Image (spheres, grey):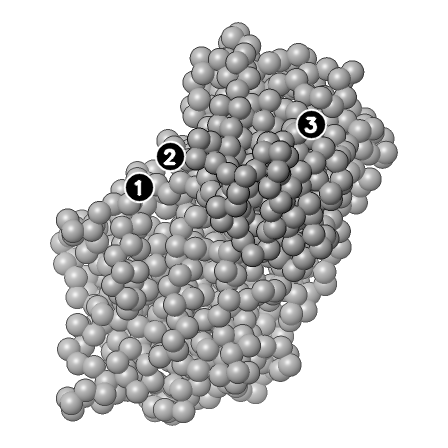
Amino acid sequence: MRMPHSGSTGPRRRTILAASAASTLLPLAAGGTARAATGSTPGSASDADPYDTLLARAATQLTGGEFDAADPDFAAALKVLDTQASGWWRDLDRSAGRTALWSDLSPAKEPGNFGQSYTRLRTIAIARATPGTSLSDSTEVADALLEALRFLHADAYNTTRPESGNWWFWEIGAPRALMDTCVLLREKIPAADLTAYVSTVAKFVPNPDRRTNIPTLAETGANRADKAVIVALRGLLARDADTLALARDGLSDVRDKGKNSLFTYVTSGDGFYEDGSFVQHGSVAYTGTYGSVLLGSAGQLIALLADSDWAVTDPKTSVLYEAVERTFSPVVFDGLMMDALRGRATSRQKAPDHKDGAAALTNILQLADGAPAAYAARWRALAKGWIRRNKTHPYLSLVGVPAIARAKAVIDDAAVPAADRLTGHFAFADMDRVVHRRPGWALTLSLSSKRIAAYEAGNGENLHGWYTGDGMTYLYDGDDLGQFGDGFWATVDPYRLPGTTVDTRERTDIGTGGGTGTYVPKNAVAGGAALDGRYGAAAMELLADGSTLRARKAWFFLDNAVVALGADITASDGRSIETVVENRNLYADGAPRLTVDGRRQPSRTGWSASLPGAHWAHLEGTGGYVFPDHPAQPSEGRGGAGLHALREERTGTWRAINTGADTGGSTTPLTRRYLTLWLDHGVSPAASSYAYVLLPGASAAATAVWSHSRPVRIVANHATAQAVEARRHGLVAAHFWQPGSAAGLTASGPCTVVVRRGAAGMSLAVADPGRTGTTVTLELPFPVREVVSADDTVTVTPGRRGTVTVRVAGSRGHTHTARLR
């Protein structure tokens, strides 16, 4: 269902770091760096005024403090800042009768226009306060900024105006930029003006705890963190101790006894979950934007207030520290933030995956400066590895002076090792995401259910996000870091996203109106089980939006392969149904070799072919695809559906998918080439099916060998169960949709099971991704003598065919494990 906009379902914010090239220069210096620059700490025996000390620290967080402008990295960042700031300075309307500060932001009274106007003024103020720019220490610039602030206050943003339009500009966007600008100009702003600005912000952001335009709505997650920073800056400028305490206490939600504290694990709604999930807006997997902003803003405030009378001392800040490795590290690939965790931000031209990844890295390094040594050491090693491996989008070219200073200290420190690429299997049950990471690649699976939205759209953003939560698979390759960040979302066929099964009906744009909303499907099953942090299985029941299409989809994650199965694919609308195996971005002029069953296929753009009976395919630079026989619908032939291939050149615009007031894309056409592989289930299929195997990074020869040797056998693919067996690994994995037997396993009810046998015994993982059961009993296909270890929810009955009973009620789809002999 589409959810209408309201304060609770569709809050709107901006990821400041990713909003523009200039904004990457705004945050966020470490508390340690700032203290060194100021030379004193509040609360010390020195005579320094505590407010002056913290205001100087806040300014340093914006500018980076002292640095070597001759250093090439700093020089490049200065040039970016200077170019952006001087351009806006030149275009600033300074005439007496002006109705706006910039012609493209007229009239100034509109929330989106005054919100962006304050952001531009902040950038100019940063450039003026930063040595080495053309605006540095300019009296003319300072005077013009003061007049511009007066204009916006008189004409647009003041205590006499009620909120209208998008609340975010009134309560976060404009006040944050205004307070930052006041911090930088604090010695020049007349007292009466400063009082007026602080009073305005006090009206719209009186505290971090509540939405001002909906006083009954408690702020959560990133919005709460952002407001806490705003309130703290307001308190410093007003020299008000109570306001500073209010900001600090907002992080811990002292007002509501910790109910919405940023330092606690949640079990529903917004916030960090113990399994590493992060949710914002009630039902959206949002680690990559809102989660990162929370980390950055909370970390900034902790650094800002450190060693002062208002220092953050909540003992549960460890939740924030643990989130770096539990929540963020699994979804960052060589500095890229995985798109499955970025929601509607994927439609923002100025916020590709590498910029949101850089923002997260910046926030992690900022947090490291004030974190316990053991945490900080691990995070710096992570960051160093990400920075070194990403040659496609060098981190130092994406961020500004404060972040560069911090990163170079890590890069140049021989005592900090560069951590290897993370490997493992991560099932994020609380946000319907699965991440499988191997040494050279990673695959992310984006699911949805009646608990987690299939997509979020609104305010003109993410207009074509229809199928992003329907089982889309994102394949990340260490040698191809531009796949999703190089024009992908502006040019990809949105009806053919990898991993999805779709009705080919024409769709209309979503999210064109004011406010944001989500589509939350009605299916219960989405998620799976993880075994030994290395293997996994996942499933999703697809109940298509606006269509009779139904499907049962499952994925099995092995060392070098991902097996994808589909069964019971049914529709009755008279339209073709397709399952998309791959839709690879070949960039502007790529023509990698496609080989099918040993035969090279044409490389010309526009080529297409039907490839019935294909056993395997290989795409140069990406990997292999195998189409094995499977035991469902044998009359349909290999794979249950015919394979099709297409090379095409697609032209699109960012504007076509994002018309947002401050994130809208360009109308300039962008062209990219694609190689698409899909399976055609025909018109209104009845119980159709599919099976394919992804072999990321495999050579053509290895793909052919895999296809012939069949190291993984598909043993079930129907409405009761989907299961595979990998004898070489001693692995059996299955998802049961109902009571039944498969691969020697017998289940009393719906569940996902992964079992591995080895010389040292066997390990077992069980989950109930539908969250519908109370207990599930499994009969194993081998003897069990004893229990080595087991979760307290698992009961084992040894015997010739061991029996395991798992109490799944209340486990929210999480994995239950046991080790047996």
Dot 2 falls on a residue whose secondary structure is loop
Question: Residue 171 shows which numbered tag?
Answer: none
**Mark closer to the chain start, 1 or 2:** 1
| Of residues 709 and 107, the one drawn nearer to the viewer in this rendering | 709
**Label at residue 716:** 3
Q: Amino acid at mark 1?
A: Asp
Quadrant of the rendered image containing residue 606: top right
- The vertical placement of 236 against 698, above or below, is below
Residue at 62 percent across and 57 percent down: it is 811
Q: Is residue 361 left or right of residue 283?
A: left
User: What kind of residue is marked 2?
Assistant: Pro
The crowding category of the residue bearing disc 2, from other C-alpha atoms within 10 Å (few below 14, some 14 to 19, many at least 20), is some
Q: Mark 1 and mark 3: span between their CA atoms?
A: 37 Å
**Secondary-structure class at tag 3:** strand
Crowding around mark 3 (Cα neighbors within 10 Å: few <14, some 14 to 19, many 20+) is: many
The residue tagged 1 is 420
Which quadrant is the N terminus positioned in?
bottom right
Inter-mark Cα distance, 3 to 2? 30 Å
Decide which of 761, 428 is in the foreground and name it.
761
- Circles 1 and 2, Cβ within 8 Å, touching? The answer is yes
Q: Which mark is residue 439?
A: 2
First in sequence, mark 1 or 3: give its number.
Answer: 1
| Residue 280 x/y as whole percent | 56, 62
Provide the secondary structure element on which disc 1 rests: loop
Kindly indicate whether the residue at mark 2 contacts the one at mark 3 (C-beta within 8 angstroms). Answer: no
Image point (50%, 38%), residue name: 821
Relative side of 302 to 773, left or right? left
Vertically, is 646 above or below 74? above
